[in-house]
């Protein structure tokens, strides 16, 4: 189905074009929509995250979840928060530490040692 199904073959030069008015109203509707939405759809994402998985497993690891956390922080990665780490979620076999939007997941292996399972860093 065509949008311009009833379009005249030759425009009436004496009067304004009906298509010009339609273009103006469509443009006005788009502008009003963007203004109402705050042009959020056109902006860059507010946050970008990178995820790194760690293979940890085996029988090696750390005695405590905090030691596993410190093993990552000791690398002084510029993309990772250096301070403010607190346990966000905890179970018998896993701890998620958070600082701002960054997260470090630490898991306990079958030997009872703690390893870093993954790191999520967001800007």
Image: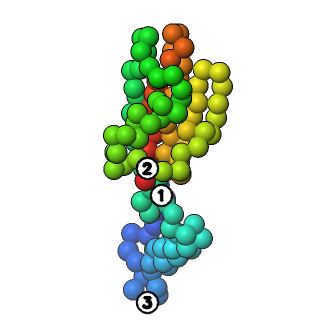
Mark-to-mark CA distance, 3 and 2: 72 Å
Q: Nearer the viewer, mark 1 or mark 2?
A: 2
SS under mark 2:
loop
Query: x and y percent of residue 98 in the render?
Result: 55, 43
- Is 11 placed left or right of 3 in the picture? left
Whether residues under marks 1 and 2 lie with C-beta atoms below 8 angstroms apart, the answer is no
Query: x and y percent of residue 106 in the render?
Result: 51, 28
Label annotation for residue 82: 2
Q: Residues within 10 Å of mark 2 (few under 14, many from 20)?
A: some
SS under mark 1:
loop
User: Label 1 belongs to which residue?
Assistant: 46
- Is 113 placed left or right of 50 in the picture? right
Q: In which quadrant of the rendered view does residue 116 lie?
A: top left
Mark-to-mark CA distance, 1 and 2: 21 Å
Query: x and y percent of residue 119 in the render?
Result: 44, 36
Mark-to-mark CA distance, 1 and 3: 52 Å
Residue 113 drawn above or below residue 73: above
Q: In which quadrant of the rendered view does residue 35 lie?
A: bottom right
Q: Residues within 10 Å of mark 1 (few under 14, many from 20)?
A: few
Residue 73 drawn above or below residue 41: above
Residue 78 drawn above or below residue 41: above
Q: Nearer the viewer, mark 3 or mark 2?
A: 2
User: Label 3 belongs to which residue?
Assistant: 14
Q: What's the residue at 40%, 36% (across, down)?
A: 72
| Residue in front for this viewpoint, 44 or 16 | 44
């Amino acid at each position: 189905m065509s949008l311009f199904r009833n379009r005249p073959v030759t425009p009436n030069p004496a009067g304004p074009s009906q298509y010009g008015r339609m273009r103006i109203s469509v443009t006005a509707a788009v502008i009003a929509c963007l203004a109402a939405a705050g042009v959020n759809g056109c902006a860059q994402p507010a946050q970008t995250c990178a995820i790194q998985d760690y293979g940890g497993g085996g029988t090696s690891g750390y005695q405590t979840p905090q030691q596993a956390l410190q093993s990552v922080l000791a690398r002084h990665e510029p993309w990772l928060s250096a301070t403010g780490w607190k346990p966000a979620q905890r179970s018998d076999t896993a701890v998620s530490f958070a600082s701002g939007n960054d997260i470090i997941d630490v898991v306990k292996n079958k030997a009872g040692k703690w390893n870093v399972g993954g790191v999520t860093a967001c800007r």
